[in-house]
Image (cartoon, rainbow, N blue to C red):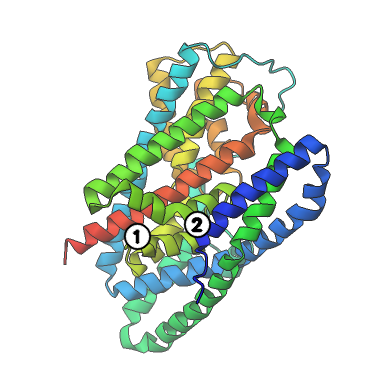
């Protein structure tokens, strides 16, 4: 019997094929074909992912909490997860600033005319208003709006209440387990369509943006991606090696499918089903992964932190502003705290960057210089975020295992 090709291999082939087709369309001058006839299939796939994200997060977190069977364990896993994410985000900021200053110091950042830059920052009411907003007033509205922070809060409350109710909640326990089993089957089917989504989206991105969009900002993009790569290799694989005893090769091989999918979809939440499979393959306990991954997809923004540090130094250079050490410390602190504070807001990366620029006195309108290539930055930062979620689930599993 012929062995079926693995999903990671299918996704890799789809990625390469998408790049090839995109380049042909770009240089052939018919990029509209990818926009009109290929991208819609990618949109359908992403719509299916968005459709399943809320039930996956809700049921997987409740099922994970119930499986732990102990609220103390839920609290222990939660604390370890948040501390891990805060520490890695702070390190990401430092890495981003180091690379940005190396590039800027060498005169590699281009000085662009910001006269045509237009960007209007979305309103951000501050951390406390965001904190209040994550507690839902209407459960169904949280679901229909796909407000992931509110969905997580609902999951925590419902899961904890089911545990507290004990034997009287047996029917609810059985319902959650049964419903989650159904969602997992649906999830498997949608995941099997991933190569189609990757191929169509990659072809569209390359065909419509091609090389022209990279010319003036190429060095800024290279700087950010160097930061992404260094952070993934040094922080994530090293933490897996130190805390779990897992080789970097094994870690990245196991996380590969989720990384490629996140790279093309630019959505940590949409990548959740694939991340869960990868985490399980790397040895993460199902109940812990069901808790850590949805939480990580919402509050873990290491890739975004690196991006905004690089972007801040670059835009400061464009504005002829030289950042001091004190101002760079402000960048690290603001970015680390904002990674959680803006998690539930659409376009969080841009809002976080606007917050940092305002804190440093850099005109927010300068963001308009990099909006055109934001998707290219977004592909790398989402890939990094998802890799961090998987690394965290593996590490927390090991830490919790030591207590047994």
Query: Which residue occupies the foreground of this view, 267 or 79?
Result: 267
What residue is rendered at 35% in x and 69% in y?
287
Q: Quadrant of residue 139?
A: bottom right
Residue 276 left/right relative to 34: left
Q: Which mark is residue 282?
A: 1
Q: Quadrant of residue 276?
A: bottom left
Please tell me how crowded label 1 is: few (under 14), some (14-19), or many (20+) other residues with Cα within 10 Å.
many
Q: CA distance from mark 2 to mark 1?
A: 26 Å
Mark sitting earlier along the chain (2/1): 2
Q: Position of residue 95 (x, y in %)?
A: 39, 29
Q: Position of residue 8 (x, y in %)?
A: 50, 58
Query: Which residue occupies the foreground of this view, 145 or 132?
Result: 145
Tell me if I can see residue 385 in this picture: yes
Residue 22 left/right relative to 189: right
Vertical relation: 309 (above or below) 166: above
Residue 357 left/right relative to 302: right
Tell me if I can see residue 79 in this picture: no
Dot 1: element = loop
Tag 2 and tag 1, C-beta contact below 8 Å = no
Q: Position of residue 69 (x, y in %)?
A: 29, 75
Dot 2: element = helix
Vertical relation: 307 (above or below) 280: above
Query: Which residue occupies the foreground of this view, 382 or 26?
Result: 26
What residue is rendered at 67% in x and 50% in y?
201
Residue located beneath label 2 in the image? 149
Vertical relation: 149 (above or below) 211: below
């Amino acid at each position: 019997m012929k062995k079926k090709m693995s999903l990671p291999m299918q996704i890799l082939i789809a990625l390469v094929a998408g790049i090839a087709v995109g380049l042909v369309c770009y240089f052939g001058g018919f990029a509209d074909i990818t926009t009109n006839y290929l991208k819609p299939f990618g949109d359908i796939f992403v719509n299916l992912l968005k459709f399943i994200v809320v039930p996956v997060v809700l049921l997987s977190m409740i099922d994970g909490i119930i499986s732990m069977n102990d609220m103390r364990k839920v609290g222990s896993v939660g604390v370890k997860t948040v501390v891990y994410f805060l520490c890695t985000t702070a390190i990401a900021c430092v890495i981003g600033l180091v690379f940005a200053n190396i590039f800027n110091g060498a005169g590699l950042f281009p000085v662009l005319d910001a006269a045509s830059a237009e960007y209007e920052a979305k309103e951000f009411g501050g951390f406390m208003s965001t904190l209040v907003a994550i507690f839902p007033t209407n459960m169904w509205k949280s679901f229909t709006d796909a407000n992931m922070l509110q969905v997580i809060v609902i999951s925590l409350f419902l899961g904890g209440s089911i545990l507290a109710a004990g034997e009287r909640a047996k029917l609810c326990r059985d319902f959650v387990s049964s419903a989650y089993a159904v969602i997992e089957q649906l999830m498997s089917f949608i995941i099997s369509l991933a190569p189609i989504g990757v191929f169509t989206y990659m072809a569209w991105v390359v065909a419509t943006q091609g090389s022209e969009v990279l010319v003036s900002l190429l060095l800024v993009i290279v700087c950010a991606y160097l930061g992404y790569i260094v952070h993934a290799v040094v922080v994530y694989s090293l933490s897996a090696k130190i805390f779990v005893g897992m080789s970097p090769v094994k870690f990245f091989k196991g996380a590969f499918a989720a990384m490629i999918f996140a790279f093309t979809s630019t959505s940590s939440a949409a990548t959740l089903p694939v991340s869960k499979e990868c985490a399980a393959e790397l040895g993460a306990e199902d109940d812990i992964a069901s808790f850590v991954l949805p939480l990580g997809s919402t509050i873990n923004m290491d890739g975004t932190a690196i991006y905004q540090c690089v972007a801040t130094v670059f835009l400061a250079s464009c504005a002829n502003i030289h950042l001091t050490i004190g101002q760079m410390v402000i960048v690290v602190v603001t970015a680390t705290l904002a990674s959680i504070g803006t998690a539930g807001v659409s376009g969080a990366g841009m809002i976080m960057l606007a917050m940092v620029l305002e804190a440093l006195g850099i005109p927010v309108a300068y963001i308009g210089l990099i909006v055109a290539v934001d998707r290219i930055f977004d592909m790398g930062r989402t890939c990094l975020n998802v890799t961090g979620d998987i690394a965290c689930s593996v590490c927390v599993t090991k830490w919790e295992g030591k207590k047994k």
